Image: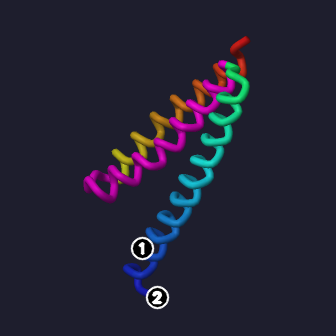
Amino acid sequence: MSPHSVETEVQLAIAVVKTLILLTGGTVTYFAYKAYARTEDRSLGLLAAGFGLITLGVLLAGILSEALGETLGVGILGESLLLLSGMLVIAYSLYDQ
């Protein structure tokens, strides 16, 4: 197998996994928001926002690297910043009284 075909296979695998993460994250965000809308519990709203930020990070990384032609490092940095923000919001939602 040539190195080029291995690279193509890895890129395809990454695209498939990122798509599945995007779909799963969107579903979790939807259900968290739906629970917030039903209960109006602020912590559930924050939880939905946190998962939304994490999901947005996955989407942003794909847009930066594929559509805008940015380097892999820039895509990873953008995704990581939104992942960190989302985790902080989720942690706060669990702490929030």
Q: Is residue 78 magenta?
A: no
Q: In this view, does 14 lie to the left or right of 74?
A: right
Residue 59 or residue 10, whichever sits in front: 59
74 to 40, vertically: above or below: below
Q: Are marks 2 and 1 in contact (CB under 8 Å)?
A: no
Q: Name the residue under label 2.
A: 1
Residue 25 or residue 71, whichever sits in front: 25
Residue located 57% across and 47% down the image: 26
Q: Where is residue 55 in the image (x, y as percent from the top left)?
A: 53, 44
What count of labels does the image hold? 2
Residue located 28% across and 51% down the image: 70
Q: Which amino acid does label 1 sit on?
A: Glu
Q: Position of residue 36 (x, y in %)?
A: 67, 28
12 to 61, vertically: above or below: below
Query: In the picture, which quadrant includes the C terminus?
Result: top right
Residue located 33% across and 50% down the image: 64
Q: Position of residue 6 (x, y in %)?
A: 45, 78
Q: Is the magenta stretch mostly helix, strand or loop?
A: helix
Q: What element carries label 1?
A: helix
Q: Position of residue 96 (x, y in %)?
A: 69, 14
Q: What residue type is labelled 2?
A: Met
Q: Mark 1 points at which residue?
A: 7
Q: Is residue 74 left or right of residue 19?
A: left
**Mark 2, other Cα within 10 Å: few <14 / some 14–19 / many ≥20:** few
Q: Residue furthest bottom?
A: 1
Residue located 37% across and 79% down the image: 4
Tell me the magenta residue range.
Answer: 42-71
